[in-house]
Amino acid sequence: MIVVRIETVTTGLDLAGVFANALLGGAVARRYGLDLFGFVVLGLVSGLGGGMIRDVLLQNGPPVALTNSAYIPTALCGAGLAFVLHISERDWDRVFTVLDAAALSLWATVGAQKAQAVGLGWLPAILLGTITAVGGGACRDLLLQRIPAVLGGNALYATVAVLVAAIQVLGTEFGSPLTGTVLGILAGAVLRVLAAWRGWNLPNAPDWQPRTFLGRLPRPVYRPRRRGPRPRPDDGGAR
């Protein structure tokens, strides 16, 4: 009974993440002024991309988005809702931040759960949880030819996914996966919203150029040899 309940919760969380990420994709499509087809494409990529990457890496049959009939309609509903909603850009920014926090936390827990369910260790589980959370958004950003949010330059993003997946793994290791799920989602959502509000981010690399021993050696200066007129072939003194 416990296994069935956990699987049901995992599927429900996965579908909630699909809907939230598809709605995020639709919000980005609205910001870029795309048409209905653009909403559909970004909604499907955002909503299903991370889960499909996870399922392909797990090699546990076809991706669940292609075998469960609820996934694609859920993603289309999220994109469609973003298409028909008429709210101000300021409100969209607020909704985007909250949805992003919720979706990131939901999928990080699901990815870690599914990795542990097939017998993977704690480190691969955290990795797959992070990939599940950020994969769809990264694919969406690449389609729009912009730097994926997971690579930095914004508030904490992938770091939150790592934390949520780690909390989920700890909960499962201590025999209480549902507790890990609840704590992970709450902690991730709160941290992501606070990071966006306060502008928390990871430090950038220092501005310096590495120099090696060979780089400090004086370089030889190349001076091209000056060539005189080419000698005429000897004709034996004949004039």
Image (spheres, rainbow, N blue to C red):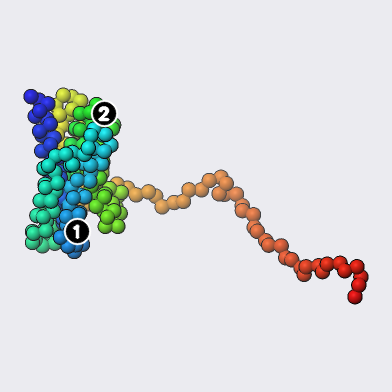
Against 14, is 172 above or below?
Answer: above
Q: Is disc 2 surrounded by few (<14), some (14 to 19) or many (20+) residues within 10 Å? A: some
Q: Residue at x 20, y 33 (%)?
A: 114
Q: First in sequence, mark 2 or 1: give its number.
A: 1
Q: Nearer the viewer, mark 2 or mark 1?
A: 1
Q: Residue at x 16, y 50 (%)?
A: 22
Near-viewer residue (19 or 221): 19
Against 88, is 104 above or below?
Answer: above
Q: Residue at x 61, y 53 (%)?
A: 219
Question: Is residue 130 among the parts visible in the rendering?
Answer: no
Q: Residue at x 57, y 49 (%)?
A: 216
Give the image location of residue 86, x and y in percent. Answer: 8, 61
Question: Is residue 119 among the parts visible in the rendering?
Answer: yes
Look at mark 2 in the image and give the residue it sits on. 120
- Type of amino acid under label 1: Gly
Near-viewer residue (152 or 234): 234
Residue 38, numbered circle: 1
Give the image location of residue 202, x and y in percent. Answer: 29, 46
Tag count in the figure?
2
